[in-house]
Amino acid sequence: MKEKLLAIKEKAINTINSAASNEELEEIRVGILGRKGELTGILRSLATLSAEEKTEIGKLSNAIKDEISAAIEQKVNALDEAEINGRLADEWIDVTLDGTFNDETAGSGRIHPISQIQYEIEDIFTSMGFEILDGPEAETEYYNFEALNIPKHHPARDMQDTFWTEDGNLLRTHTSAIQVRGMEKAEPPFRVIGPGRVFRYEATDASHENTFYQVEGMMIDKDISVSNLIYFMKVLLREIFKREVKIRLRPGYFPFVEPGFELDINCLICGGKGCSVCKQTGWVELLPCGLVHPNVLKYGGIDPEKWSGFAFGLGLNRLIMMRYGITDIRHFQSGDIRFLKQF
Ligand code: FA5
């Protein structure tokens, strides 16, 4: 019995040492120490032995069991260590090396075309004495509508489909909300612009997005007239397009200006012939504007008897489309790197 046990041990140690994986070791363990294993079988047959032999063989087999278990554990550790060392050697990388750049997917980032032109417009206006204002994208009804002379139930609210929040606020539908906040803070005379993202609950097409950008502008001073307004609009367009562009001014209705205008530019995508961007009209609606309504001045805490002003709300996406010949407004938010790479 003793010899048999020692033979089992020797065979076990040899197979353990030559095992190449943890799975193999587990098989060996089950084959020897498992319920139906060789050593377990011998322990079961102890019943037939004398008390003396039982003690001797029992002790020996327990010692062998411990030895085999320890050998397995040692081998598991050795295999684990070898695996780690192998991976360290195979997967070694030099983190100090330059990356490999695939032009399609990587490379340095750049500024989004909307931001680029926004910064350009900011430069143009600051050079003419305008300050830049900011405002919240989630607005109150007061700043987005009421203080702009659009009371509740006024039909003009239907001109701008709105995303409402459950607590009665909304995502601003235009940057005009910024003018109201500006008037509350500034003392006339002043000139401000307010660029920002705006939201409308609209179906999208080549020239309509539900999330787009505007640049609001406002100048309050003594005796401001439509010719001041036209002057600044012409400067802006000349600076942006680096040439004279054909414009047309037609009456436009916005409750916060009186008189109000739509300033359209000749479609630069089709040269005025008609395309999907200008809806076959040859003109693109870009720059609604007008003289600030006295009620709006009052809401802003400004005396309309003393002061007057103009305001405009430039559609930034469409301006950029005209400048670069972009035929679909939805490219701006597509996240398509092929589009963005061009700017
Ligand atoms: C307004 O939002 C007024 N707040 C503008 C204004 C300001 C008038 C100050 C007078 C004085 P309107 O809804 O027309 O107006 O939008 C202004 C410009 O935003 C449009 O001329 C157009 O260029 C752009 N725009 C409007 N709706 C969309 C849209 N869904 N997608 C992309 N651009 C749009």
Image (cartoon, grey):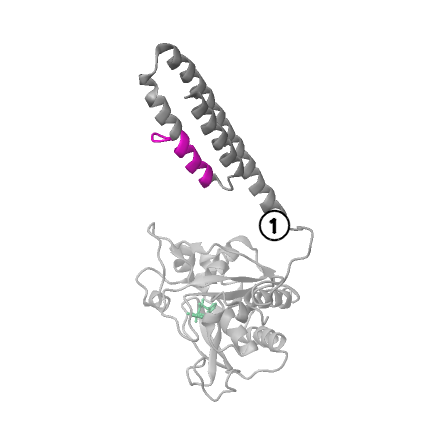
Amino acid on which disc 1 is placed = Asp
Can you say whether 335 is above or below 69 in the image? below
Does residue 315 show up? Answer: no
Q: Specify the principal SS of the magenta part.
A: helix
Can you say whether 160 is above or below 184 in the image? below
Disc 1 on helix, strand or loop? helix
Does residue 332 show up? Answer: yes
Magenta segment includes 34: yes
Q: At 51% from the left edge and 29% from the top edge, which residue is drawn?
A: 71
Question: 177 or 88, which lies in front?
Answer: 88
Question: 281 or 156, which lies in front?
Answer: 281
Q: Position of residue 140 (x, y in %)?
A: 40, 53
Can you say whether 52 is above or below 92 in the image? above
Question: 274 or 133, which lies in front?
Answer: 274
> What's the magenta region?
23-37
Instruction: State the quadrant of the C terminus.
Output: bottom right
Q: At 50% from the left edge and 86% from the top edge, which residue is drawn?
A: 270
